[in-house]
Image (tube, grey):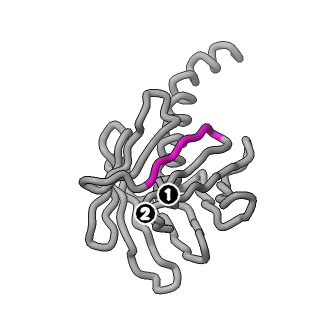
Amino acid sequence: MGNNLNWKKGIFKSTYEILSGEMFIGNLRPDSWSNNGKGELNGKKYIFETKGFFNHETMIINPDTNLRAGKITYNTWKTKATIEYAGKVFFWKYDNGWNTKWSITDSETLLVRYHGSFTKGEIEISSYDELLILTGLYITNYFWQISSVVTFTAFLPVLITIFN
């Protein structure tokens, strides 16, 4: 793969800082309470607006034109996503069972590969596309938020029992 970027965020912060070497080049600011977010990379800005109750879809909006730039559709098990953008379809998926590696491909080519934990990671890029790079981070954050809520909900009865 060609270019490498890094991202980092504080353990209790939601903003991802995206770096090229040591230089800050962008960020992704997900909204924890609404599954929406805003991202900027190399001066290109996007808004992520998620709608739906069981079948979530995220619209990617260009704030300069207020027009839809793309759309994310999630599979039922929240392990894969389809990105529609610029008349093409891209596929996001986890590449390992620990959900620490994920990638975006088109029908033939690996375009962006991610590796990371909850607080930092790397992005390997073969096709430099700001929208795809931000979208890959957004989808991962979205799935991590959902799994955190599910885990908390599963343990809630235990916590209630312990503290009663």
Q: Quadrant of the C terminus?
A: top right
Other-residue count near label 1 (Cα within 10 Å), few / some / many at <14 / 14–19 / ≥20: few
Residue at (55, 76) in percent of width and height: 44
Q: Position of residue 109 (x, y in %)?
A: 31, 54
**89 or 78, which lies in front?**
89
Name the spot of residue 120 as percent of width and height, x first. Answer: 66, 44
In the image, residue 122 sits, relative to residue 2, either above or below, namely: above
Quadrant of the rendered image containing residue 126: bottom left
Q: Earlier in the sequence, mark 2 or mark 1?
A: 1
What residue type is disc 2 on? Ser
* Relative image position of residue 111 (x, y in whole percent): 40, 56
Residue that appears at 59% across and 69% down:
41
Task: Please state which of residues 76 and 133 is positioned toward the viewer in this rendering.
Answer: 133
Residue at the image position 27 percent from the left and 67 percent from the top: 88
* Prevailing secondary structure class for the magenta stretch in the rendered image: strand
Relative depth, front residue between 103 and 77:
103
Direction front: furthest residue: 2
Q: Amino acid at mark 1?
A: Gly
Relative to 36, say whether 158 is above or below: above
Q: Who's the residue at 64% across and 52% down the image?
A: 7
Q: Quadrant of residue 121?
A: top right
Q: Which residues are magenta?
A: 112-118
Relative horizontal placement of residue 158, taking residue 71 as reference (left or right): right
Q: Which residue is mark 2?
A: 127
On whether residue 40 falls in the magenta region, the answer is no
Residue under label 1: 2
